[in-house]
Image: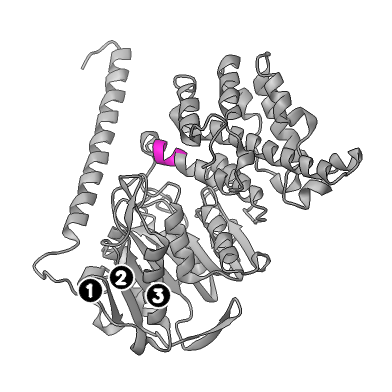
Amino acid sequence: MANNKKDKSMESILWSACDNLRGAVEPAEYKHVILSLIFLKYANDRFDMQREKLESEGKPEFMLDSVSFYEQDNVFFIPENARWNYLMSQSKKEGLAIKIDTALHEIELKNPSLSGALPDNYYSRLELENNDLASLLDKMNEIDLKKSEDKDVFGRVYEYFLSHFAIKEGKGKGEFYTPQSVVAFLCELIEPYDGSVYDGACGSGGMFVQSMKFIQEHQGDTKKISVFGQEKTATTLKLAKMNLAIRGISANMGNKATSTFQNDQHPDLKADYILMNPPFNQKEWRKENELTNDARWKGYSIPPVGNANYAWILNFVSKLSSNGVGCLLLANGALSSTGTEYEIRKQLIENDLVEAIIILPMKMFYTVDLSVTVWIFNKNKKSRIVSKNGRNIEYRDRTNEILFMDLRKKGHPFEKKYIEFTSEDRKEIIKTYHDWQSIEKDKNYHDIKEYCASIKKEDLIDYSLVPSKYIEFKNDMVDSDFNEDMKEIQVELKDLLLEQQESYENLKKIMEELGYGI
């Protein structure tokens, strides 16, 4: 993170800014209030730097106000009444909220790449006191983004806010920003060098950002990638559009913020790569008589109403091109669930779509302690040669084989209470996966106790995809999934108790209003 003029960390400045919001807006709004102002400050700092550069090159005055001289370097043009110095000069005057809303609107009009990305009359609707909003601007003014060339600052700020507020907001399991080290890991697994990339639960767009970073870090061509996404929440979709626009990433995000299930924005898409981290164990995602004939379930049982995990799987699979590959993050319970989910999983395995199952360490995510699974789906597991970023890769025939990996002992401490994969961790794990895929598998890959195992379809145990059933553990008396299961049961029990408490409080309030006490 960039440091401010007084060498205070950006985190401490933002936390202090949030203190000013307490009691004025709901905690769930904090990140939206702050992030739009961070964007405004970031865009202005970049504009100022570009203007200073043009001045140093001796450009005439009329060029300094020409949008094209900013667009060419992926810098947003800032109209006069949206410039930071102007807003600061107005901060102690009445109507500041309207001025900020006007500034964001004017910036969007001047920069087509921001169409639909910036909040619309958001600050006016918040009805914040003028002094509170002015105080926020003062805090933002302490941050000097000119000192940093880090174009990912917006995503990092977003991650910071989710890590601190998501639990308090009461979000469902899985509805959180995917940590950068996890997304980097997913990209390195499937190597999205060219073609189309899809994320049907794109959140703030982190999967797309990391895909582009992956290409840049490997000297690839980002122009060979096309991006397709969908997000249900309108405010989050705007954040995603801001996040992508800042990096110059053009994307088809559909016509509006809406449910991927009820209103698929890309019904005919066949993507070469898919990266998704949808909400875990989403309940009542459809009504009993709804989506019963959806084309995405063709050839499979209809996913149950009570849990959307397998609906996300079938949406995922339906979007893959004939040679498509992708990673889907899901709660571990999906590996061995029964009933309709069992029937769908059985058919997925029979259709030879599952390439690998990878258990991640606990504490990799900011809002759940549970371990999470990476499912890798591949539409073409046959022997073939693929050109990737100027090199030819020869894949062996993996038909009816699945690689199982357990990474719960991998990773390193991150900010004391979290775990992340370092670049060295990722390098080791990715090598194992790619060696297993390779034509030289027998020379470079072998099963390792408590780490990995390659299993034929006929050796699967009743279509279960739980890795501990196939990876050899040193202590055979220990069921490695017991603690995981108990942890998940404890979390679900806690959620149930909280729901019961909330119901009781609501009932108590109603009875008191009717003149009865409980």
Q: Are marks 2 and 3 in contact (CB under 8 Å)?
A: no
- Residue at the extreme left of the image, as rendered: 477
Residue drawn 53% across and 47% down? Answer: 204
Q: Position of residue 266 (x, y in %)?
A: 60, 60
Q: Secondary structure at mark 3?
A: helix
Image vertical order of residue 196 relative to residue 81, above or below:
below
Give the spatial CA distance, label 1 vs label 2.
8 Å
Q: Amino acid at mark 1?
A: Ile
Q: Secondary structure at mark 1?
A: loop
Q: Are marks 1 and 3 in contact (CB under 8 Å)?
A: no
How many discs appear?
Answer: 3
Q: Position of residue 317 (x, y in %)?
A: 47, 68
> Residue 431, which numbered label?
3
Give the spatial CA distance, label 1 vs label 3.
18 Å
Q: Is residue 25 magenta?
A: no
> Residue 471, which numbered label?
1
Earlier residue among tags 2 and 3 = 2
Q: Identify which residue, 384 or 349, lies in the foreground.
A: 384
Q: Which residue is mark 2?
A: 405
